[in-house]
Amino acid sequence: MKPRSIAVIGGGPAGSLVAAKLAQSGYRVLLFDEKLAWEKPCGGGLTHKAITRYPFLREAHVERNWISRCEITSPSGRRVEFQLDQPIAIFSRRVLNGLLLNMAVQAGAELRQLRITSIEGSLGHWRLHNPDREIQAEYLILATGARNPFRAQFSRAFTADDLMATAGYFIPRTRDSIELQFLPGLHGYIWIFPRTNHLSAGICGKLGALSTTRLRELLEQSLRKAGLAFAGTEFYAHILPALSLNTLRRAPVTGPGWAMIGDAAGFTDPITGEGLYYALRSADLLSDALLQEHPESYSIRLDTDFLPELEVAARVADRFFTGRWMGEAVTDRMVQFTHHSPKFRDLMCDMFSGAQGYMGLRQRLYCALPAMVAESAISALGLRGERRCRPGIPKAF
Ligand SMILES: Cc1cc2nc3c(=O)[nH]c(=O)nc-3n(C[C@H](O)[C@H](O)[C@H](O)COP(=O)(O)OP(=O)(O)OC[C@H]3O[C@@H](n4cnc5c(N)ncnc54)[C@H](O)[C@@H]3O)c2cc1C
């Protein structure tokens, strides 16, 4: 049955997009967010894949930064800088959330600044509460982000295995490249994402492995080394879903009269932490399922869309951060190959743009490996010669 009213709890990218699409198609949509457009702790980076699928991200007349250079530092201190063939758009989250909330309101969604504190009822008869009022709706969409207070009620609460801890600073400086740094033994990484008038610098690590205080110390050490003053700037800490394979496969994200989207469902890449694309895409898939009056087809749509990608990432995440490849840390080898092999650099560009997913990566890597090794050997020999006459030219090799 087509629900007469749909309540969406959470007006981040996932909630706003689903509200916009459903309201546009004539549904009565009630959209609740406790903060409206706010600077949610985030890098704010959107890949070419996201921008191509959601052209409003490119076309909207709002502030965002386009970055085409990337610098990666490996656990042993090797560094490589390379040109991306497709730029990454970096948004302030206040701007991005504002853009999407505006789209929802323009489409006819009824936006209310309200924190929903409890939910009762069942299919067709949901009752949402906050201390001052009760709101009724026939269908319920949970888009509350990673700190989803209703997960245990509807599905299963996240465990430490499903989350990363993050900490970061918004630093009033600009740069022209994205910087990523991997540290020995850290299941996570440091990033510096330049926005139009500040940097979003942060660190993520598996929840429970290192405390937020320790992560903050590691980040601060790295910022000091990079000459970035952070004292007195805004500090943030948040959690980031990085679901285990078990949770991805078994925890339900939809049931009679309800569905979860975006971070509330845990849809982020367990390696990169990319979640904006999956927030928008899950909103898209759920709205398509509802518009076709088959809400239960949402899970099938997820299974035939991005879930298999996230499952591969969940399976290999630990190996990527702490494993070894050809006798060195995987991330060290990645930096070495990026430096020496044009073929591997192409692959990295495709990974950053989203053109190359995790499925098919193994095969591409192994088919190209002999050529990559040959290119690296030739380049390393060349570099040795170059080093003798012009020391300092190859960046940290
Ligand atoms: C430090 C950090 C860096 C990141 N960097 C990137 C990046 O560079 N690129 C990328 O793609 N992804 C990144 N991510 C992930 C990305 O931020 C999330 O995937 C994305 O915000 C998910 O969108 P969402 O709409 O599902 O949830 P959110 O953006 O979290 O939105 C949820 C909304 O729900 C509201 N809400 C919550 N509870 C209630 C309630 N009870 N009642 C009313 N309102 C409520 C909140 O106010 C919030 O506005 C990062 C995450 C972190 C933590």
Image (tube, grey):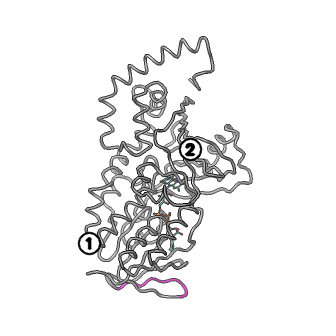
Q: Residue at x 62, y 52 (%)?
A: 196
Q: Are marks 1 and 2 in contact (CB under 8 Å)?
A: no
- Indicate the quadrant containing the C terminus: top left, top right, bottom left or bottom right: top right
**Amino acid type, residue under disc 1 in the picture:** Gln
Q: Which mark is residue 292?
A: 1
The label number, if any, that marks residue 202 in the structure image: none
Residue at 42% x, 32% y is 324
User: How dense is the environment of label 2, judged by Cα within 10 Å: few (below 14), some, or many (20 and up)?
Assistant: many
Q: Is residue 127 magenta?
A: yes
Q: Which residues are magenta?
A: 125-132
381 in magenta: no
Q: Position of residue 378 (x, y in %)?
A: 43, 16
Q: Is residue 110 above or below residue 209?
A: below
Image quadrant occupied by the N terminus: bottom left
Left or right position of 227 against 280: right
The residue lying toward the viewer, choosing from 61 and 364, is 61
Q: What is the three-letter code of the residue carrying label 2?
A: Ile
Residue 216, percent across and down? 63, 49
Disc 1 residue crowd, few under 14, some 14–19, many 20+, Cα 10 Å: few
Which secondary structure dominates the residues rendered in magenta? strand
Residue 93 position in % (x across, y down): 56, 60
Please name the residue that numbered disc 2 is placed on. 190
Dot 2: what SS?
strand
Q: Which of the 4 image quadrants contains residue 385?
A: top right
Above or below: residue 382 compared with residue 117: above
